Amino acid sequence: MKRATYSRLLLELAAVLLACCVIVPFAMICIGSVKNVREAALFSLSLPTEWAFGNYAEVVKAAHIGRGFFNSFFISGLVVLSVAVCASMAAFVIQRRNDRLLRAVYYLFIMGLIVPASIIPTIKLMMDLHIHNTYPGIVLYYTSVLLPFSVFLLTGFMKSVPRELDESAVIDGCGFFRLYVSIVLPLLISVLVTVTIVVMMAVWNDFFGPFYLITDSTKWTIILSVYSFVTQYNTNWGLVFAFMVMVISPVLVIYLFLQKYIIEGLTAGSLKG
């Protein structure tokens, strides 16, 4: 009994330490965003002697934050839509047919989880296709990178959906496309919510994709706007922290409201997987 108690206390202590690794820097950013130039440069967790909420107003005036948010939401939205449609269709066909060809296709998707994306050949291919430095190019890049995880998740869940549903629908005269739209797709909603959150956070927080594949600053995502802002205002960390808080807030709010769906989606179908 004592051994179990000590093990649990040890795990809880480790969890608290890991949580501190995330919470302490985040608290430093939030507190630093309302400090003046001198106090923000100290990078401490102490409260400011004078609250400088004007940092947020200065950020809105100084940075093209609206354009960065638009680009991030636009690219993230298109990637989420394309990944959800392509992954759900692929998972449906792969799991239901389950022949040698489709199993090979599935393993190719799984290889995408292991093999990292190579930037130089990707840039060359995009330039040959004339989609480099364009919205369609970056959307296709993210879709190809994030499809393997989504297909893996959805295929695992599809195993828990009874085949009798398909057979009943086909007997009633349902075609394959209608079977997918009317029967299968509504059953995948919980997993698709998980895919949506994971894909959106991956695209929103990614730095290297737009850094290498988009050279036009008017198409930069909000993360690249932070990079540009830091290099421009690295002497005023109060402004930099305020910019970071504004960038983090949308994704943080979405995650807090939908976090339970991530767990449900990741564990859905695991008993029959």
Image: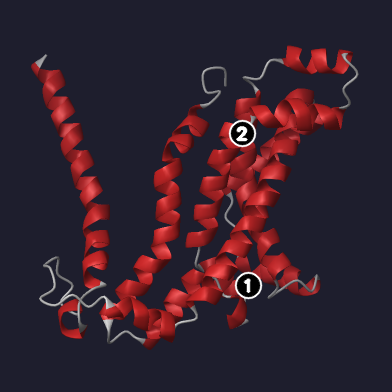
Question: Residue at label 1?
Answer: 213
Residue 64 higher or lower than 142, as above or below: below
**Left or right side of 15 for 263:** right
Pointer 2 local density, CA inside 10 Å: few below 14, some 14–19, many at least 20: few
Question: Residue at label 2?
Answer: 189
Which percent across, then down, holds residue 95? Answer: 72, 26
Helix, strand or loop at disc 2?
helix
Q: Earlier in the sequence, mark 1 or mark 2?
A: 2
Which percent across, then down, holds residue 79? Answer: 65, 55
Which percent across, then down, holds residue 182? Answer: 77, 28
Q: Residue at x 81, y 12 (%)?
A: 168
Q: Residue at x 72, y 72 (%)?
A: 124
Residue 193 higher or lower than 238, as above or below: above
Q: Residue at x 14, y 65 (%)?
A: 45
Residue type of the residue flagged with mark 1: Leu
Q: Residue at x 39, y 46 (%)?
A: 256
Separation of residues labelled 1 and 2 (CA atoms): 32 Å
The answer, for residue 230, to whether it is visible in the render is no
Quarter of the view holding residue 243: bottom left
Quarter of the view holding residue 169: top right
Helix, strand or loop at disc 1?
helix
The answer, for residue 79, to whether it is visible in the render is yes
Pointer 1 local density, CA inside 10 Å: few below 14, some 14–19, many at least 20: many
